[in-house]
Each structure stands twice: as C-alpha cells, then as structure tokens.
Image: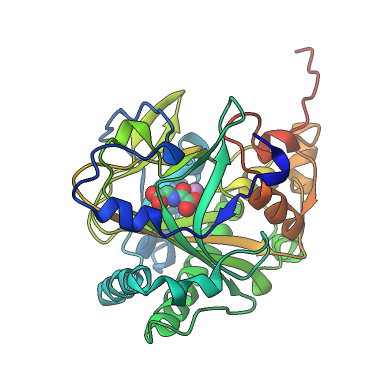
Amino acid sequence: MDSDSFKPFEFDATLKVAAESSSLKSVPSKFNFSNERTAFTSDSLPVVDFSALVAGDPHQCSKAVDDLAAACREWGFFILVNHGVPETLMDAMFRVMKEFFNLPDSEKKQYEAKSASDPIKCGNFNVANTSNQSFTLWRDYLKLYVHPNFHCPHKPQLLRDVVLEYTQITRKLATKLIEAVCEALELNQSYVEEILKMDSSFQMFATNYYPRCPQPDEAIGIPPHTDPGLFTFLIHNGVAGLQIEHDGKWFNADSPHNSILVNAADQLEIFTNGRCKSVKHRAVVNEEKERFSIVVANGPSGEAVVGPAAALVEKDGGAKYNAMKYEEYVESQLTKSRVDGKTLLEQQMIFINNSN
Ligand code: OGA
Ligand code: NI
C-alpha cells in the first residue's frame, strides 16, 4: 500500500448499490477480508437491571451494583435491561436511520469525512490488513458528535429530534452506570467528577448499516477493536452480528428485544487501573438480512486527562496505564486504520516488572 494515497475515509456509493443488486454473487475485491466468523453462544452473558440500580431498595441496589462491577471485571460487557428508554423511540430511530441511508448520494456526500475530527461524517471506511493492503469495510456509517455540542444533518426531518432525545437519555444512563462502578470501587464521587467532568462529557453517536453480503466470510463489518470512552451503548434492528472476545474466544452478543448492549471502553479500563475490561469486539455480516446498529460512545469530557484513579494506583502500587487527554485519544484512535498491531489501549499500558 502506498501510504500517501491511503485514505481511511471514503465516500463511495458502491457498497449500497452493489449489495442491493441481486446479481452480486461474490464480494468485490476492494472489500475482500477473509475472516472466521464462527463464535460461541453463551447463555450466561451478564445482565444488569438498571431499574434496581436506581430503586430506593438498598438491597436491590447493592445487588445491581455488584452485578455491574462483576460484569465489567469478567466480561467488560453486559445486557442492560429495564433501562427506561421508550421502545417507540428506539423504533423511530431505526426508521429514520434507514431513511438517512436511503437519501440520494448527492445529499449524503456533503457529509463525506475530510478529517478524523469532523463532527459529522458519513461514508465507508478503509483499513489496512496485515499485508499492508487496503480494504473497505462492509458497512456504511454516519457518525456525529452530539455532546457538549450537538451536530446533526438536517435531513431526514426527524433525525435531529430522535438523535437528540436518545443521546440525552443514554447520557444520563451512562453517567449513572459510571457512578455505580465507581461506588463499587469505593472511589470518591467528587474526585470522579473532578477528573471525568461528566457535565461536559464528549458523546459520539454512530449508526452503521451492514447490507446483506453474498460471501460473509470474505468481508467484515468492523474488525476487532476496542472503543474509546467509558461505556458504549449498542442497539440493533434484531439482526445479530456483534461478537465479543472473552477468555480468548469469540462469543455472539445476543440480546433480548428492547435491551441495550453495553461494553466498558478504554477510558474506563484506564481509570479503574485495569479493573474494568475494555472488551474487544467486532461486527460480522450475513447473507440473509441487512443489519442496522445504533451506537453511542459515552466518554468523559474531551478536556479530561484520564489516567488511573489515584486511590487505585496507591492500592495497586503503581499505574498500569499512561494518562492522556481524552480528545487527543479519540483523534489518534480515529486516524488509526490498521487491523493488526497493538490497539491504542495496549499502547497506553505500562508493563510493571513485577518480581512476585
Ligand atoms: C462500533 C461497533 C458494532 C456493531 O461501532 O464501535 O463496535 O455491531 N459496532 O455495529
Ligand atoms: Ni465498537
């Protein structure tokens, strides 16, 4: 690959058009990425009951806090139920996202990404494989920065309202989950607020469209990665495709209708000095059904310099990660476009030579 000509962002109508063509029998070469998408199915994925976290009953609440802390420690992932997000809002989101991807290319092209930090971006994404060849992900996306400043395309008409409502609700849920995790780790809440500055939390919204794929083992929606931020929330249109890594194996992240899939993300692993796991995950594609996912990455403030919490560093006898300003972290992760090598999180790790 000629690195000067490599562009991670691209606006190209071929994915949607090609995938919709019933004559497409194989994956066009630019999307070619062989992958093994078989995964285990577990009936013991962690579940966290949000209503118990906020209920007045101290017994219920402490059980929910324990469940949350265990899920973050063992899986870095859980299924959030009784979260209070209206089903009608979720349905409206999927309808309007579908409308967005169906807009004419001339309309969408104005949001073609020019740089990683554009607050509104849409198109396809290129990555480099282990042999340094570029390939395109089997996915169209729209990504928006929604807090502290709200950015959103003007069309379709309802997009702005539903994205605003959904991201406000999920931001509140995320803040409560962070408070609960920190409570379980006995971190002082005012210290947590001083470092993470959740009032100005940097929140990103993304929607992914994965068309049906004629050869699902020869293309991938999103290769294995971890997310920036504290907690990522994901909902989908009832078509499975998210897989998570656990104990060195891949698992299907199946979810009951109306639940939210939540994963701990890099800044939570860093802040908790490794107690919460930022789990590796990927999105695979399938032959039968198109899939939409709606993803909200809930971060600390862009201004927050996130390193391991002082009290945990003291307990552990050292910091396991370097600190970095969140806005810089996001920018470096967005411009990283290789599937091999270390993730940005792994690059932040400090390996303490421990003779024990
Ligand atoms: C992401 C992501 C998975 C999916 O957008 O970061 O991991 O299933 N998406 O769409
Ligand atoms: Ni992700």
Horizontal side of residue 330 vs 87, given as left or right: right
Q: Position of residue 182 (x, y in %)?
A: 61, 53
Tell me if I can see residue 119 in this picture: yes
Identify whether 179 is placed above or below 216: below
Note whether 120 is above or below 285 in the view shown. Answer: below
Colour scheme of this structure image?
rainbow
Q: Position of residue 102 (x, y in %)?
A: 32, 70
Q: Tell me if 64 is positioned left or right of 256 in this view.
A: right
- Determine the residue positioned at 36% across, 74% down: 103
In the rendered view, would you say 12 is above or below 87?
above
Which corner quadrant holds the C terminus?
top right
Expressed as whole percent of the image width and height from the top left, the position of residue 135 reads 51, 39
Residue 157 appears in which quarter of the rendering? bottom left
Picture residue at 41% right of the left edge, 45% below the top: 221
Identify which residue is drawn at 45% across, 37% down. 75
Judge from the rendering whether residue 303 lies leftward or rightward of residue 208; answer left or right.
right
In this view, the residue in front, 286 or 57, is 286
Indicate the quadrant where residue 349 lies. Answer: top right
Q: In the rendered image, which quarter contains the N terminus? A: top right
Query: Image quadrant of residue 141?
Result: bottom left
Q: Position of residue 255 (x, y in %)?
A: 28, 49
Residue 9's place in the image compared with 311, above or below, is below
Q: How many marks?
A: 0
Between 199 and 235, the one nearer to me in the picture: 235
Foreground residue among 157 and 324: 157
- Can you see residue 260? no
Residue at point 47%, 58% (across, down): 12
Residue at the limit of the structure toward the top, as seen here: 355
